[in-house]
Amino acid sequence: MSNTSSIRGITDNGRYIVVSADTHGGGRLADYRPYLPSSLHDEFDAWAAEKLPDGDQTNPNNFDHNQRRDEQFADGVVAGVVLPNTDTPFTFNVFERGHDRREIELQWEGFKAHNRWMADHCASDPTRLRGLIQTSPFVPEKVADEIRAMAETGVMTGGVLVRVAPPDGTFPQLYEEHWEPVWAAAAEVGYPVTTHGGNAPVYAPGSGRAVIELAEYSFWTKRSLTQFLLSGIFDRYRDLKLVLTEQGVGWIKADLPMIGWFAKQVKLNHDAAGADHLERTTRQTFRDQVRFGASFPSAGEIASLGDDAVHHIMWGNDYPHNEGTWPHSMEALRVAFAGRDAADVAQMVSTNAADLYGFDLDALAPLASEVGPRVEEVARPIGSEDYPTDSYSPAFTLGSVGMMANA
């Protein structure tokens, strides 16, 4: 095998410096209390006393720093972006109707408490961790102030997490003026905007509801790409990046040309309210300003992007979710990247995320030289008969029946 030590994202002893673009974490409800205004402590205590903790609240791999670090190292991952994963104070489903102004204000205080907890969590190991900023879709001016405040911490460079509303939903679409303060603040501090799979509206009861909701999860969040590409947000903020995390990548091959076709047709008809405001082709804008937090991708999904894959993909293990690749990320990396050029793999598992989120690869290299996956191991093909049998990850469960190989 050729010498890879000169490739950025690979250590001198031939190991990838893996930076996961998709991990999750959060505190227990009691952990957030000190971060709330003291005037809300009694109200929080009464609310929390009636709140049953979700499973994530009781799982220490959401909040125990040592356990999280050790499990990630055992999985070959030395650094990661940390998205939220546990209920925050005064939480409610933002897609449900009927919540009053006071509930919205309390929920926002809960989101801010999470942001401060997350900043402290990441500051405990700033070389390895970057947090995302929780936002409320109801208070954009306050969100803009929060983005600027969190930028002062230096460890919340994972970006700004937003939700995507369905049409006629409880809050405005991403292309509406409502969101402009948020985009302006994110661009000002240089933070990407992130949407994450699983933000679905409320489904009515009925036969098949649960499986229909699961099957359509990614559909709702993928709409962020259309809204950013066609609204002119990217033209107003040329340095702003959009990251679509845990939403697959195989669909882009079909969807991106269609989005571009619609934009071109509207322009040909000289519809001033349609697409005349767009200054670039959708493909050029996509290349310049869109990235993917690609959790458990298959080789077929990556191949579907062609040469664009190396530029756009940031691999993620979705730790500690059971649909993620932990604790079998070596096998998942082989599924996705066996046989690919090592320099290309290094971009997708290391340097793309490091550059976007501000990780120092030189500082991470000593850790990776001990625990990172070896380049020659990742390059070795893996058959479905060698997939882990105790994993729920689509990297193995869908790939083993050939579905994702043809994505």
Image (spheres, rainbow, N blue to C red):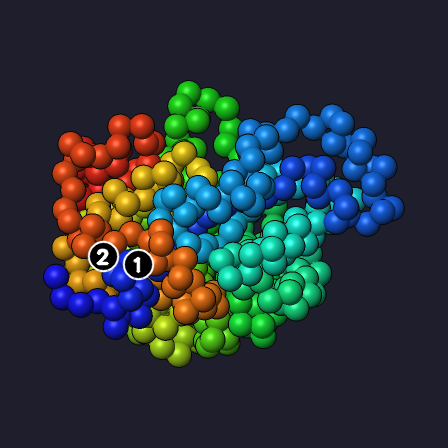
Total label count?
2
* Local secondary structure at mark 2: helix
Coordinates of residue 28 in the picture (x, y in percent): 65, 37
Coordinates of residue 350 in the picture (x, y in percent): 35, 61
**Is residue 306 left or right of 192 when viewed as pictured?**
left
Looking at the image, which residue sits at the far top? 207
* Local secondary structure at mark 1: loop
Check if mark 2's residue and mark 1's residue have beta carbons within 8 Å.
yes
Looking at the image, which residue sits at the far bottom? 279
Q: Is residue 228 above or below residue 84?
A: below
Q: Which residue is mark 2?
A: 375
Q: Which residue is mark 1?
A: 16
* Picture quadrant of residue 78: bottom left
**Is residue 320 left or right of 400 when viewed as pictured?**
right
Residue at screen point 56% across, 35% down? 60
Q: Is residue 266 above or below residue 36?
A: below
Amino acid type for the residue under numbered disc 1: Tyr
- Real-space CA distance between mark 2 and mark 1, rounded to the nearest whole angstrom: 6 Å
> Residue 162: which disc?
none
Q: Is residue 384 above or below residue 381?
A: above
Residue at screen point 35% across, 51% down? 371
Question: Foreground: 138 or 41?
Answer: 41
Amino acid type for the residue under numbered disc 2: Val
Coordinates of residue 69 in the picture (x, y in percent): 49, 47
Q: Quadrant of the N terminus?
A: bottom left
Residue at screen point 40% across, 62% down? 366
Coordinates of residue 284 in the picture (x, y in percent): 32, 73
Sequence-first tag of 2 and 1: 1
Residue 99 visible to an observer of this rendering: no
Question: Foreground: 346 or 206?
Answer: 346
